[in-house]
Image (cartoon, helix red, strand yellow):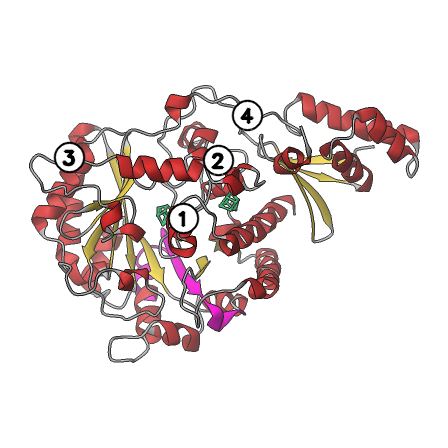
Amino acid sequence: MGQVSGRADVHMFKYGGLLLVYDVNSGSLHQVDDLAWEAIDLLREGSGRERARGLLSRSYPPDEVEEALCQVDELREERLLFSPAVPLQNEKLSPGGVKALCLFISHSCNLGCRYCFARRDSQGKRLSHMSWEVGKKAVDFFLEYEGGRFREMDFFGGEPLLNFPLIRDIVGYARERALPRGKEFSFTLTTNASLLDEQAIDFLNREDINVILSLDGRPAIHDLMRSFKNGLGSYETTVENSKKLLQGRGNNNYYIRGTYTRHNLDFSNDVRHLLKLGFASLSLEPVVSAEESLALREDDLSLLEHQYDLLVDLYLEQKEKGSPFLFYHFILDLEKGPCLYKRLSGCGAGLDYLAVAADGSLYPCHQFVGMDEFYMGNITAEPFIINREVGARLAAAAREKEACGCCWARYLCGNGCAASSYFMTGDLQKTYNLGCALQKIRLERALYLQAV
Amino acid sequence: MQHIRTIRKGNLQELDHRGCRECQASCQSACKTSCTVGNQVCRQQEETKS
Ligand code: SF4
Ligand code: SF4
């Protein structure tokens, strides 16, 4: 095949003094010397073995060239390099069941974060809190719908803790109902932490609920983006409450997640700050926003890339010191990661992942909540008919994204995010290029960290 | 002389019995956990490991 398919199937990059080769169709990673680098590059660009040998022998001893080419042959045979695309069974590509459900426990929030996507939701006309009837129906729907053993339920909003009693009731009910059906629930709460009182902390820790705590980093950065409705920053409260919560769970099962925007293009300092506070399970995400003062620009890419370099340094430095931390985007499991079926169906929005608004309306994912175009029915309706076509449309668009088909990162990224395609490009089939660039920057570094 | 050191043998060529869909959901958006599929572990392999 031509050049494009070579580059799409074998990705070569240099990082931190290493020459690295990632074989896309097998998911293998190799470190090579200069000779093997040149050999693989020639083969990748379409040179035959003999031609490559001739060309390489001009600069390297012929016996070494042969040795390197033989090593490539062996890896090719083992399907670890230049591995072929694997034939897939069509029926396994579209999941029938639902395995993750996101509940909008409350659409209201006690903060007014500047980048919050929920703010674009039809303000005012929406029911604020989910009722017990809807919550219970959501559990019933989730358990009755086909799907496997593991069920993920996610308490989201707005700020879900504004409606804390409902979370408590849902967890109790879901666990009770799941047991005789042989299902297992895992719960996650995404919260700004400002409403974590003793009662909530106790409950979350006792019930083993994963938490995602929103904290952006340095006080000035956090407070600029994440203030209470009265304009006061939420940093102090968030940090104090998060620490209390984590103490009670042996610092397990949590992520501190922040968002970086144009206001902190030096976000590695925010990671440093979070580490200083004692948090070691971190995720910092690029904002996806069209608002000019916040939005990241193509021009920012080299600065951002450098920040990820600094993060790699910090990561290695902390590891060396014996106090490692987790950075979500650097976690990669090439040997035990999900199979191709999963990787090709991406996020599953509208298929095996759905979101329920407070009034019971169903949408393909939390980002599309409130948008008529993506409405999939209401779980309280009798009879309830779910409009599966919405999900099928998102999945088809994801599969047809042209840029993904020839992107080396396709099985690590999973064809990107439908919502960012939609909101940033207006077209489900287009990729959000800045997001892709950042994705690839992070992945190269994550791969590098596998090698050191 | 070794010109190539294999750091990780990927598992993407193995498809027998795969596609069970028991793995975690994966959302990439900034407001969630932001796990891309690359960050995850296959449940079948996770269980055989332990
Ligand atoms: S969304 Fe972007 S980075 Fe991800 S696979 Fe598609 S082109 Fe590659
Ligand atoms: S469309 Fe985007 S935001 Fe929605 S579930 Fe998929 S990755 Fe997440």
Q: Closer to us: mark 3 or mark 2? A: 3
**Residue A288, quarter of the rendered image:** bottom left
Q: Amino acid at mark 3?
A: Ile
Identify the residue at horizontal 55%, vertical 53% (top origin).
Answer: A437
Asked whether residue A249 is drawn in magenta, I would say yes
Q: Amino acid at mark 4?
A: Gln
Query: What number is the disc on residue A385?
Result: 3
Q: Amino acid at mark 2?
A: Gly
Q: Secondary structure at mark 2?
A: loop
**Residue A163, quarter of the rendered image:** bottom left
Q: Secondary structure at mark 4?
A: loop
- How far apart marks 4 and 2 lie (CA) works out to 12 Å
Judge the density around disc 4: few (<14), some (14-19), many (≥20) Cα neighbours within 10 Å. Answer: some
The residue indicated by pointer 4 is B13
Chain letter belonging to callout 3: A
Q: Nearer the viewer, residue B19 or A333?
A: B19
- How far apart marks 4 and 1 lie (CA) works out to 32 Å
Q: Closer to us: mark 4 or mark 3? A: 3
Q: Closer to us: mark 1 or mark 2? A: 1
Please provide percent x and percent y for residue A411.
51, 37
The residue indicated by pointer 2 is A337
The residue indicated by pointer 1 is A427
Q: Nearer the viewer, residue A197 or A337?
A: A337
Dot placed on the residue nearer the N-terminal end, 1 or 2: 2
